[in-house]
Amino acid sequence: MRQAGLDVDEKTGMAPEELLAVVGDYDAMVVRSATKVKKDVIQAAKNLKVVVRGGVGVDNIDVEAAKAAGVEVKNTPAASSASVAELAIGLMFACARQIPQATASTKEHKWEKKRFSGTELLGKTLGIIGIGRIGREVAKRAHALGMTVLAFDAFITKVDDPNIKMVSMDELVSNADYITLHIPASKDGAILGEKQFGMMKKGVTIINAARGGVVCEKALLAALENGTVKAAALDVFEKEPTENWPLIDHPNVILTPHIGAATKEAQDRIGEELADILIAWSRK
């Protein structure tokens, strides 16, 4: 960006009050997920014209306040799609073969071969909730593994991929062996709650590498306890860092600390896309 003639200040690790004190000096701001650009920040940013979020979700930005103030909000949706999709597939394998549990057992000098009998992904039905960029990347990989792919999206009714069957939400949750979510957080709350878990086949596996809150953790825990959900793998949580100890301690739950986009390749692409967005914006 500097080579393109932009003046760039790098300010990391600022407390909220520090951000409020300096934000008025800038025309553009780049943030990651940890920086909260709420209404008070927007109001203090008298010169701000654009906020760019390095990553997919913009739930750390008050988009409505930005819109009211005439501030553009942009993100880098394509940069991390492959990385998040690969994590989702990896978590499915981890659940199917109990890889973390088997690792922990073997590290305790045990040899519990019979305990860790698993299942194949081949021939299973995967339900994808949200068939945008990441959802389609997951679908490609799932099809290559021999899975049947069902998808539901509140905003997309048709896809060009013949290997993806678009269905209703009810049909998806009733028929899937695995369910993975790739949707943004919603003000309407969780898309998977008590009602949806009640419709699922016994032994389903849940994968959430999207956003905390799209799966009701209380309802998920109940479904794990009653056997509806065989296993769950979560990269995101209602509160981060999570303090949901019953969920954390459940033997059939695999957890990662929101690392969906945490690959070298994704971070490189995010940086490149951020630079491209701001350079193009500056030349309008």
Image (tube, grey):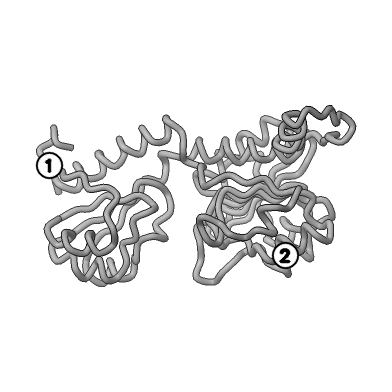
Image location of residue 168, percent across then percent down: 68, 60
**Residue 47 position within the rendered picture, expressed as x and y whole percent measured from the top left:** 13, 62
Q: Which amino acid does label 1 sit on?
A: Leu
Which residue is at a point 65% across and 51% down the rendered structure image? 151
Residue 37 lies, in percent from the top left, at 31, 62
Q: Which residue corresponds to mark 1? A: 6
Mark 2 touching mark 1, by CB under 8 A? no
Q: In this view, does 19 lie above or below 142?
A: below
Q: Write the residue at 54% across / 51% down.
A: 210
Let me know if residue 31 appears in the view: yes
Q: Quadrant of residue 212?
A: bottom right
Q: Residue 196 carries which label?
A: 2
Q: Which residue lies furthest to the right in this view?
A: 114
The image quadrant where one finds the N terminus is top left
Q: Residue at x 71, y 65 (%)?
A: 219
Q: In this view, does 41 lie above or below 142?
A: below
Residue toward you, 129 or 92 = 92
Q: Is mark 1 on a helix, strand or loop?
A: loop
Residue 23, x across and y down, in percent: 18, 60
Residue at position x 87%, y 36% in the image:
115
Left or right of 144, for residue 14: left
**Foreground residue, 119 or 276?**
119
Count of numbered circles on the image: 2
Crowding near the residue tagged with mark 2, few <14, some 14–19, many ≥20 C-alpha atoms within 10 Å: some
Given residues 164 and 190, the one toward you in this image is: 190
